[in-house]
């Protein structure tokens, strides 16, 4: 009887909502077409490149028995042909060269009351006439070559009012850079304390350096020669800072690049901005476009979006997205040698693998490996590097990604406006259908709600298209997991009403698997609808990102409570399963609170906090070493690593929800129901990571379903055995 009523209800729901279902179907078809175009773009972006960092390579060479030239040739034999060389600054000349250079902020110089007596009288006289203050930087070049290199760089690049140059008779000299408070670097605030009562006397902050210590003077010819003699290409890196970065500066930098044997493949910006940014991006844009140079987008340390460098995004968009994402081997990654108990650089290899496969990284800016337990000591065994790069190349080949002399560039794909509008209308239709599924609203009200939503879509895409596409994506990320949740709850309740509580276990397991599969399919549709509106190249390069991930995870959990009340009710007295009634809300509001409810609520809050905090790359909760090793094992043996929360808990929970509903357990359905929602939102969340190639999302979900079914069967078997033992013990006690 109940089964017939359920089927009739479903037929009636379809009959009454044909137009809404048709709109949803059309929007899904359109989203699949857009996804197909994106997959084509991803399939043409399959070549990565590696750029070595010269300064760190030189530091490693100094700790080994070989010089920098030997090491460059070793890496050249590994197939690496490019070396990133930073232009020289006061700091780099002091720390990484043999040139006799020193630089000091005038505040530090003037702390010596007799500082002027330490310098030539002529210099002091002319310097005083030029004028100085404590924010300036005083550079001493103690040899003619050093003075010539720095003074030439300063004269060619910077405005005369920003510097003072004085040369001694022996060819050495001084260069003073005109600093300001904004360019000055201070120590952290520290407190002075009285000796008797240890009370604060005052807070003190000292000038310790200046950004001017990092401004660029040019490429050091001796380093360029070493790189080119090794048969490798120089990728110059120029640090640019506001106030010292105008057109004159850009033209001088470009002139310096022109002296290289070859036009650089990439521009990897250093400092705050692209060259010439004080006057706009025109000079850098013309240079890059005229020479077909690819600009780099350096991924942030949190592996979310790219480092903010002024002018970079402007150039990327104006160039038709002639850009490539760059993964810099940050210091914390350099230290992952013999990490997690692995031998060698396995975890660094894993990190590079994930960057390339999962995040559209196509250039690795590589810095040599450092010891895990001694973070100042480099690994100087060349075989470690050969093994790591060889293993990386082999693993990437299984994804049809190859190592080449130039990184592939992503096609400038953009999702069309009409497609976004159609998908937005599909989301509106799904939302109206979702409301109709739990509330007895009439045809006119449904039509009015849809028309109101459609007007909102038209207005949003007319006035604020960029925000509208994000809202469309966010709506899909919330609505379709809610639809999947509603389906799972409805089916579980229908099974509970139509099947005997002692139903054969194989049949219950089969129904649980079917319910899981159907729920995942609905969520995958939601994932596709979420990804499609923001599958344009600006999202795939993470210039723009999807926002609201955690909220999209939370809202379906809240909806589950509504869906559960609509079908299961609270306590006794549910009259119309499938409809949210006033009595449902009244019963739950008037329920007596027991101690076990408070304890359960506390546990759920802790689990919920942990769940939300673990969502995203910038989580405050670190992943344990054991879990990372488990993840890596899955990653090594599968095309894509399934999400732990899906196959270990969430997907089995769907099967357990069906089982506990059929067996008429009281509390367990709501607990497993909450776990089920996590699975539905997680599937959609997989597709929210627009930088991740789509095929990985499908593989990841498929593996999770397969493993989840196995664990679900085991869980049901354990519950069944435990329930029978409990009943047997209960009878014995009686």
Image (tube, rainbow, N blue to C red):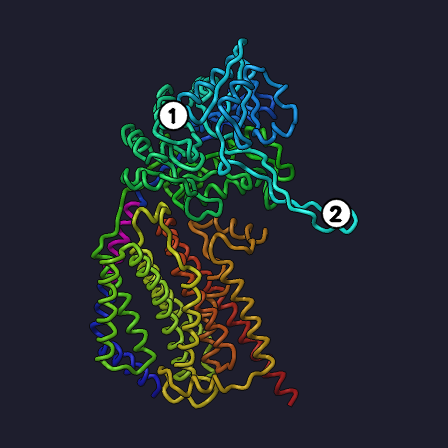
Residue 13 lies left or right of residue 189; in this view the side is left
Please name the residue that numbered disc 2 is placed on. 194
- Give the position of the C terminus as an image quadrant: bottom right
Q: Residues within 10 Å of mark 1 (few under 14, many from 20)?
A: many
Q: In the rendering, at what x and y percent does residue 529 appear?
A: 31, 60
Which of 484/368 is in front?
368
Answer with left or right where residue 267 lies relative to residue 172: left
Residue that appears at 51% across and 37% down? 181
Q: What element does badge 1 sit on?
A: helix
Mark 2 or mark 1, whichever is nearer to me: 2
Say if 723 sits above or below 624 in the image. Answer: below
State the residue in front, 705 or 168: 168
Q: Residue furthest top?
A: 169
Disc sitting over residue 253 in the figure: 1
Q: Establish if 554 lies above or below 295.
A: below
Give residue 203's position: percent from left, percent from top.
Answer: 64, 46
Image height check: is 168 above or below 30?
Answer: above
Magenta range is: 27-41
Quarter of the image where the N terminus is located: bottom left
Name the spot of residue 571 as percent of width and height, x first: 48, 86
Q: Residues within 10 Å of mark 2 (few under 14, many from 20)?
A: few
- Nearest to the observer: residue 75 or residue 660: 75
Disc 2 element: loop
Above or below residue 166? Residue 355 is below
In the image, taking residue 5 as reference, residue 308 lies left or right, namely: right
Q: Tag 1 or tag 2, which sits nearer the N-term?
A: 2
Query: Mostly what secondary structure, the magenta segment?
Result: helix
Q: What is the distance, in whole Å, between disc 2 and disc 1 at their CAs?
A: 52 Å
Contact between labelled residues 1 and 2, with CB atoms less than 8 Å apart: no
Q: Is residue 475 magenta?
A: no
**Residue 285, picture quadrant:** top left
């Amino acid at each position: 009887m109940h089964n017939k009523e359920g089927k009739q209800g479903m037929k009636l729901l379809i009959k009454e909502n044909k137009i809404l279902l048709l709109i949803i179907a059309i929007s899904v078809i359109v989203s699949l077409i857009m996804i197909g175009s994106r997959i084509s773009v991803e399939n043409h972006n399959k070549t990565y490149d590696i750029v070595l960092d010269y300064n760190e390579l030189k530091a490693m060479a100094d700790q080994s028995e070989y010089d920098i030239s030997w090491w460059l040739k070793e890496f050249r034999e590994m197939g690496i042909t490019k070396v990133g060389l930073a232009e020289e600054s006061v700091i780099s000349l002091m720390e990484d060269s043999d040139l006799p250079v020193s630089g000091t902020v005038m505040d530090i110089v003037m702390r010596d009351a007799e500082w002027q007596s330490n310098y030539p009288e002529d210099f002091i006289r002319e310097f005083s006439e030029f004028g100085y203050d404590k924010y300036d930087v005083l550079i001493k070049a103690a040899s003619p070559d050093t003075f010539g290199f720095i003074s030439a760089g300063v004269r060619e690049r910077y405005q005369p009012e920003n510097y003072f140059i004085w040369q001694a008779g022996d060819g050495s000299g001084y260069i003073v850079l005109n600093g300001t408070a904004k360019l000055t670097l201070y120590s952290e605030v520290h407190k002075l304390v009285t000796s008797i009562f240890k009370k604060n006397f005052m807070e003190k902050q000292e000038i310790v350096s200046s950004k001017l210590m990092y401004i660029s003077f040019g490429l050091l010819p001796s380093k360029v020669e070493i790189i080119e003699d090794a048969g490798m290409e120089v990728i110059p890196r120029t640090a640019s800072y506001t106030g010292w970065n105008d057109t004159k500066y850009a033209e001088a930098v470009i002139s310096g690049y022109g002296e290289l044997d070859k036009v650089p493949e990439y521009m990897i910006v250093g400092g705050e901005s692209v060259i010439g940014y004080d006057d706009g991006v025109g000079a850098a844009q013309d240079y890059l476009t005229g020479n077909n140079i690819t600009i780099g987008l350096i991924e942030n340390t949190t592996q979310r979006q790219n480092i903010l460098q002024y002018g970079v995004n402007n150039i990327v968009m104006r160039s038709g997205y002639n850009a490539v994402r760059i993964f810099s081997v940050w210091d914390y990654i350099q230290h992952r040698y013999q990490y997690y108990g692995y031998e060698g650089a396995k975890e660094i290899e894993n990190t590079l693998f994930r960057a390339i496969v999962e995040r559209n990284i196509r250039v690795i800016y590589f810095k040599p490996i450092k010891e895990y337990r001694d973070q100042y000591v480099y690994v100087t065994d060349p075989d470690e590097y050969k093994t790591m790069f060889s293993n990386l190349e082999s693993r990437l080949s299984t994804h049809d990604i190859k190592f080449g002399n130039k990184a592939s560039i992503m096609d400038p794909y953009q999702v069309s406006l009409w497609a976004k509008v159609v998908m937005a209308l599909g989301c509106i239709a799904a939302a109206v259908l979702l409301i109709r599924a739990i509330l007895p609203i009439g045809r006119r009200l449904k039509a009015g709600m849809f028309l109101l939503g459609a007007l909102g879509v038209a207005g949003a895409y007319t006035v604020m298209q960029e925000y509208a596409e994000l809202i469309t994506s966010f709506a899909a990320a919330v609505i379709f997991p809610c639809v999947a949740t509603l389906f799972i709850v409805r089916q579980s309740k229908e099974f509970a009403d139509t099947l005997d509580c002692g139903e054969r276990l194989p049949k219950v397991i089969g129904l649980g698997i079917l319910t899981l599969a159907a729920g995942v399919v609905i969520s995958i549709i939601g994932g596709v609808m979420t990804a499609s509106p923001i599958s344009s190249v600006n999202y795939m390069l993470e210039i723009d990102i999807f926002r609201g991930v955690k909220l999209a995870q939370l809202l379906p959990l809240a909806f589950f409570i509504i869906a559960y009340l609509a079908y299961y009710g609270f306590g006794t007295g549910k009259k119309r399963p499938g409809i949210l009634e006033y009595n449902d809300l009244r019963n739950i509001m008037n329920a007596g609170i027991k101690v076990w409810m408070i304890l359960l609520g506390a546990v759920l809050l802790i689990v919920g906090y942990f769940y939300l905090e673990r969502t995203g790359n910038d989580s405050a909760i670190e992943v344990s070493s054991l879990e990372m090793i488990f993840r890596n094992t899955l990653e090594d043996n599968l095309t894509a690593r399934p999400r732990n929360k899906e196959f270990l808990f969430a997907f089995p929970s769907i099967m357990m929800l069906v089982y506990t509903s059929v067996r008429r357990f009281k509390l367990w359905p709501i607990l497993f129901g909450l776990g089920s929602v996590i699975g539905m939102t997680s599937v959609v969340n997989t597709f929210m990571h627009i930088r991740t190639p789509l095929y990985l999302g499908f593989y990841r979900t498929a593996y999770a379903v397969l493993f989840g079914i196995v664990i679900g069967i085991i869980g049901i078997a354990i519950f069944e055995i435990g329930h029978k033992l409990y009943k047997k013990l209960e009878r014995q006690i009686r």
